Image (spheres, rainbow, N blue to C red):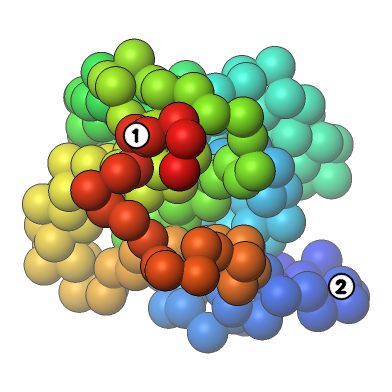
Amino acid sequence: MRHPKLRSMTPSTAFNFFRRLPSKADMLLLIGAKNTEAARVMALRGAHVIIGARNTEAASEVKQSILQSTPSARIDIIQIELSSLKSVRAFAEKFLAMDLPLNILINNVGVMYCPFHLSKDWIEMQFATNHVGHFLLTKLLLDKMKSTAERTGIESRIVNLSSEAHMTTYRRGIRFDKLNDKDL
């Protein structure tokens, strides 16, 4: 049976997506504190929500907002900076040490049209944040997702969100040989 608050809500995109998931999916790992709707809907469903965020203060505000309407919500916050491979590895290590199941991973952090800057790993900042960080995190958590699916019988999901910024890309496409070129 659905939660009473879910029955009375105006369906949102997050609601419509999550209602198609198995009702027993009990763990959501949301990367990015700005997508409060996904965290709210899964918390209403009784899932344990982990918010990975660069800005833990903003993530705490999201958590408090959800707890006001759903006091029984289980929400934890772990700091992550997706443009830093060291931070992504540290996040994965902290999450895996919690020994929680992982049914759903939502990669929802992105930057666009930022001034040219290289990450600590010498990767162009937008590419590091929007692609490399998500890829590494997914790779580090994939075995946990597979073992959760095997143990629970609930199919795991990975959701990668993006914007429409790819519609305004360079005319010659992505120039992988010049990703770190300031004058591109």
Secondary structure of the residue carrying numbered label 1? loop
Quarter of the view holding residue 37: bottom right
Residue 104 horizontal side relative to residue 43, left or right:
left
Nearest the eye: 2 or 141: 141
Residue 182 position in % (x across, y down): 45, 31
Secondary structure of the residue carrying numbered label 2? loop
Q: Which amino acid type corresponds to the residue marked 1 in the rendered image?
A: Asn
Nearest the eye: 131 or 160: 131
Q: Residue at x 49, y 23 (%)?
A: 117
Residue 22 position in % (x across, y down): 43, 78
Location of residue 87 with respect to 137 vertically, above or below? above
Q: Residue at x 84, y 45 (%)?
A: 69
Rendered-image quadrant of the C terminus: top left
Residue 84 position in % (x across, y down): 34, 23
Rendered-image quadrant of the N terminus: bottom right
Q: Which amino acid type corresponds to the residue marked 2 in the rendered image?
A: Met
Q: Is residue 165 visible?
A: yes
Nearest the eye: 123 or 161: 123
Q: Is residue 26 visible?
A: no
- Mark 1 or 2, nearer chain start: 2
Which residue is label 2 attached to?
9
Which residue is label 1 attached to?
180
Nearest the eye: 138 or 61: 138
Q: Residue at x 34, y 15 (%)?
A: 120
